[in-house]
Amino acid sequence: MQIFRFSLIFLLSILSPVVMAEGTMIATILQADFSKDPEVRLLVRVVDVGGGSDTPSMVVRNQCLERKASAERPGPDPCFSIEITESNKQRAIVRQTLLNDPQRTTDPIYLEIVYRSEVSESDPTNHHQRSATLKIEENGLYNWNNESEQALADVEWFPSGNGVLDLMVPDADALLNSVFRDRMSRLDESGQKALRETQRAWMKFRDAECQADPKLHKSVFGEWSDACLIRATIERARQLALAPDKNRR
């Protein structure tokens, strides 16, 4: 399986003028942050369905850093070529950041993508019902749902009958666990011990902050409990992913 996949990628790369790119991934926009509009920050999960459990991921961190950054493939982690279309306009990509370090094809890939949009003149604070299409590509392999409009969920979520929050809570936990393992692998023994203690303290803080009031059924900040857990967990994952690496010169 591994030899076949690498052979496919090689053939697609050398025959790109002739062979159409192949949709082997699913890219899902999990969250949109409009706090710095017109720059929009997306949390994106990418699942590669084209390989097996013994196949290396196409975005191992060290390999991403070796790729050349460009307008279509921005850094600091130029893993993918990216296209975002919103309101029938292709938007400028500001940066992409790899939040975890997937090792196998079966490991989900979490990216933070920032792009430049437009602020509505009639209602600049209304972000509801905004949507965009997202295409990511590497070596002729792209996400097959690249033509599907995806909702840009605001940073506030409300309970709904479709189970969106039930899906997002474990997804946020999966992201945090992946980033935590990656960060632990780059620390010495004393650093690992300190990070474990810090993480335990943070989890107690998060759970207390997001605990629902018995009467109002909302957190201390007025959020629904699950929405608070998602926000806090994603923020913590991003904090760990982007923290300075003391071993890097």
Image (cartoon, rainbow, N blue to C red):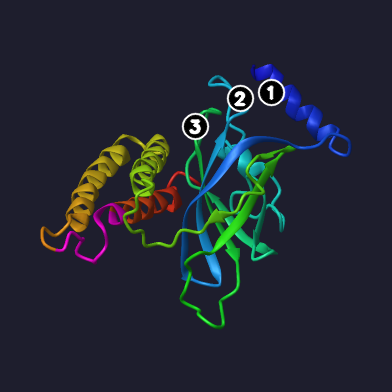
Q: Earlier in the sequence, mark 3 or mark 1?
A: 1
Give whichever of 147, 191 is nearer the camera: 147
Q: Name the disc covering residue 51, or none.
A: 2
Q: Would residue 18 be found to the left or right of residue 73 on screen?
A: right
Q: Would residue 189 be found to the left or right of residue 79 on screen?
A: left
Please, which residue is most extreme toward the front here? 161
Is residue 63 depicted above or below 165 in this figure? above
Give whichever of 222, 141 is nearer the camera: 222
> Which residue, given by chain and number where applicable, does mark 3 sit on?
107
Q: How many marks?
A: 3
> Which residue, given by chain and number where applicable, does mark 1 sit on?
5
Residue 133 position within the rendered picture, expressed as x and y whole percent measured from the top left: 63, 54
- What's the CA distance linking mark 1 and mark 2? 7 Å
- What's the CA distance linking mark 3 and mark 2? 11 Å
* Residue 170, image quadrant: top left
The answer to whether residue 218 is magenta is: yes
Residue 134 visible in this rendered orientation of the protein: yes
Amino acid on which disc 1 is placed: Arg
Residue 201 position within the rendered picture, expressed as x and y whole percent measured from the top left: 20, 48
- What's the CA distance linking mark 3 and mark 1? 16 Å
Number of residues whose C-alpha sits closer than 10 Å to that of mark 1, classed few (under 14), some (14–19) or many (20 or more) = some
Give whichever of 7, 240 is nearer the camera: 7
Is residue 153 depicted above or below 10 in this figure? below
Label 3, secondary structure: give it: loop
Q: Which residues are magenta?
A: 216-228
The answer to whether residue 102 is magenta is: no
Q: Name the disc covering residue 168, or none.
A: none
Label 2, secondary structure: give it: loop
Asked if the residue under mark 1 is in contact with the one under mark 3, i.e. CB atoms within 8 Å, the reply is no
Q: Earlier in the sequence, mark 1 or mark 2?
A: 1
